[in-house]
Image (spheres, grey):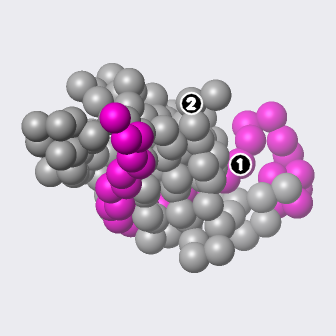
Amino acid sequence: MPIVYITKRVNFNAAHRLYSKTYSDEKNESVFGKCNNPNGHGHNYILDVTLKGEVDPVTGMVANLTTIKEDVNRLIVDVFDHKHLNLDVAYFADLNPTAENIAVVCWKILSDTDYGHLLHKVVIHETPTNSAEYRGE
């Protein structure tokens, strides 16, 4: 059977503030720069979820992209969209919402779905030039 990679892309908008409780205000500003704005700042995130698997000979699919879209929207977009990640999203109550950590959280959320065993990678695009990729390692 052929192995194929399929990707579902979704968008959400969210604010966050990067900082460490263990750093002084000066060190937070030095390490995180403008991302340390005390009131947060926003991004138009793009999330790519890629699955890897054999093409089913009956359906011709690795997985149903409609189901994946519904799950990603329900489990991630509906939870993160138009929220301040630090303040409104429990996953980040004690976790700095960097692109890297957002990618890991998205992986963990999706790994519990029916197709979690097919997850190959998640990529969170924070800006057109900044992204973080996680492959469950």
Q: In the displayed structure, does residue 48 sit left or right of residue 60?
A: right
Q: Is residue 75 visible?
A: yes
- Asked if the residue at tag 2 contacts the one at tag 1, i.e. Cβ–Cβ closer than 8 Å, the answer is no
- The kind of residue on which mark 1 rests is Tyr
Return the residue at label 1: 19
Element marked by disc 1: loop
Q: Is residue 86 magenta?
A: no
**Label at residue 63:** none
Q: In the image, is residue 39 above or below residue 24?
A: below
Residue at the far left: name it: 58
Q: Is residue 21 magenta?
A: yes
Quarter location, residue 30: bottom right
Please rate how many residues cluster around mark 2, counting C-alpha atoms within 10 Å: few if below 14, some from 14 to 19, many from 20.
Answer: few
Location of residue 38 in the rendering, given as x and y in whole percent from the top left corner:
63, 60
Return the residue at label 2: 136
Alpha-carbon distance for marks 1 and 2?
25 Å
Identity of the residue drawn at 33% across and 55% down: 8
Residue at the far bottom: name it: 128
- The kind of residue on which mark 2 rests is Gly
Task: Give the mark nearer the N terminus: 1 vs 2.
Answer: 1
Observer-nearest residue: 34 or 119?
Answer: 119
Please rate how many residues cluster around mark 1, counting C-alpha atoms within 10 Å: few if below 14, some from 14 to 19, many from 20.
Answer: many
Identity of the residue drawn at 29% across and 30% down: 115
The segment highlighted magenta reads: 1-30
Element marked by disc 2: loop
Q: In the image, is residue 99 above or below residue 93?
A: below
